[in-house]
Image: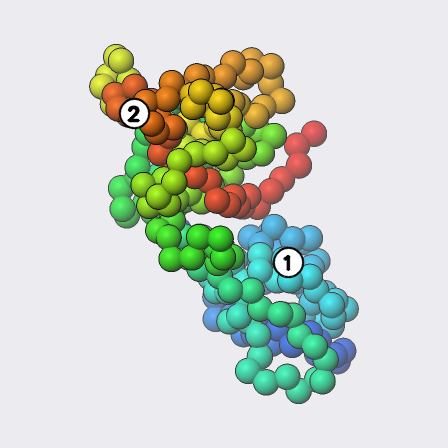
């Protein structure tokens, strides 16, 4: 568990400049958590001085995306940071409807790996924009491991998925999906993330999307009983990827 040290009142930013309306709530929540601007900026994946400039008034037109990252790092939503009344006369950032998604397992991108659902005590929530395309559908998150889908989902991404049985439709060409198969050696289920192409005869082709040529071989899933999956114990296309999230992106050199 991360431990923070409370900073003394002398470290609180000077308010001589006009600040954006969300700054008060951000500062209040920082004080409650006992974290400094630089620590919050690091947790939120924004520039090292971004929070400090926001609190000091040097950044008075912050982008909504950056504010959502800060809100997530503070354990709240952008709406929670908005003032109840707008006294400055300036249009504030329009809040975006969000919902919590539980990340409850991990999946290998592009190659088969034992399907792992973590113990419930290890599940954690992420805040994601409300899905207007599939309102009310049960969603869950999976942590992506591996490089064989790195054109779309770099290692460490979280994909948000909905099971096709809940959607009531079959996979379509262009969908990004979670596919599962039963291992011939262990009998356990294995899972992978791939892109789907549906052929004219109903067969499905599962394609990796990688910059690595070693991950270029697709998997053909024959059509079965009029459905676009092969059923079990062979291969089944289980879930549709409806969103993805990249926590704290970093650059490597």
Determine which quarter of the picture holds residue 203.
top left
The residue labelled by disc 1 is 66
Which of marks 2 and 1 precedes in the sequence? 1
Q: Please tell me how crowded label 2 is: few (under 14), some (14-19), or many (20+) other residues with Cα within 10 Å.
A: few
Q: Position of residue 87 (x, y in %)?
A: 66, 87
Q: Element at badge 2?
A: loop
The residue that appears at 38% across and 49% down in the rendered structure is 139
Measured as percent of width and height from the top left, residue 241 is found at 46, 40
In this view, 22 is above or below 253: below
25 to 139, vertically: above or below:
below
Label 1 to label 2, Cα distance in Å?
Answer: 48 Å
Instruction: Give the colour scheme of this rendering.
Output: rainbow
Question: Crowding at label 1, few (<14), some or many (≥20) Cα neighbours within 10 Å?
Answer: some
Indicate which label's residue lies in the foreground, 1 or 2. Answer: 2
Q: Specify whether 179 is left or right of 23.
A: left
Q: Quadrant of the C terminus?
A: top right
- At 58% from the left and 56% from the top, the residue drawn is 69
Res 32 seen here: yes
Is residue 142 visible in this depiction of the protein? no
Residue nearer the viewer, 54 or 1: 54
Vertical arrangement, residue 182 with respect to residue 83, above or below: above
At horizontal 53% and vertical 70% (from top left) the residue drawn is 79
Mark identifier at residue 31: none
Q: Which residue is mark 2?
A: 225
Residue 219, position as x, y percentages in the image? 45, 17
Helix or strand or loop: what does disc 1 sit on?
helix
Residue occupying image coordinates x 63% and y 57%: 65
Q: In front here: 86 or 131?
A: 131
Image quadrant of residue 60?
A: bottom right
In this picture, is 124 found above or below 220? Answer: below
């Amino acid at each position: 568990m991360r431990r923070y040290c409370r900073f003394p009142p002398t470290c609180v930013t000077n308010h001589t400049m006009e600040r954006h309306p969300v700054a008060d709530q951000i500062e209040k929540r920082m004080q409650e958590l006992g974290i400094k601007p630089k620590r919050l900026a690091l947790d939120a994946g924004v520039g090292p001085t971004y929070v400090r400039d926001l609190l000091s008034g040097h950044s008075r037109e912050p982008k909504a995306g950056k504010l959502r990252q800060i809100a997530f790092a503070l354990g709240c939503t952008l709406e929670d940071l908005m003032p109840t009344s707008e006294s400055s006369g300036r249009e504030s950032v329009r809040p975006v409807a969000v919902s919590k998604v539980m990340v409850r397992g991990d999946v290998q991108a592009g190659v088969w790996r034992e399907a792992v659902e973590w113990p419930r005590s290890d599940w954690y929530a992420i805040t994601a924009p409300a899905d207007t395309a599939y309102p009310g559908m049960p969603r869950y998150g999976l942590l992506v491991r591996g490089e064989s889908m790195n054109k779309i989902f770099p290692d460490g991404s979280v994909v948000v998925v909905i099971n096709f049985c809940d959607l009531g439709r079959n996979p379509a060409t262009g969908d990004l999906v979670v596919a599962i198969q039963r291992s011939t050696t262990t009998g356990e289920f294995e899972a992978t993330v791939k892109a789907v192409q549906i052929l004219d005869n109903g067969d499905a082709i599962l394609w990796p999307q990688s910059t690595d040529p070693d991950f270029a071989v697709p998997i053909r899933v024959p059509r079965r009983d009029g459905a676009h999956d092969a059923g079990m114990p062979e291969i089944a296309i289980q879930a549709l990827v409806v969103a993805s999230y990249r926590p704290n992106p970093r650059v490597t050199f």
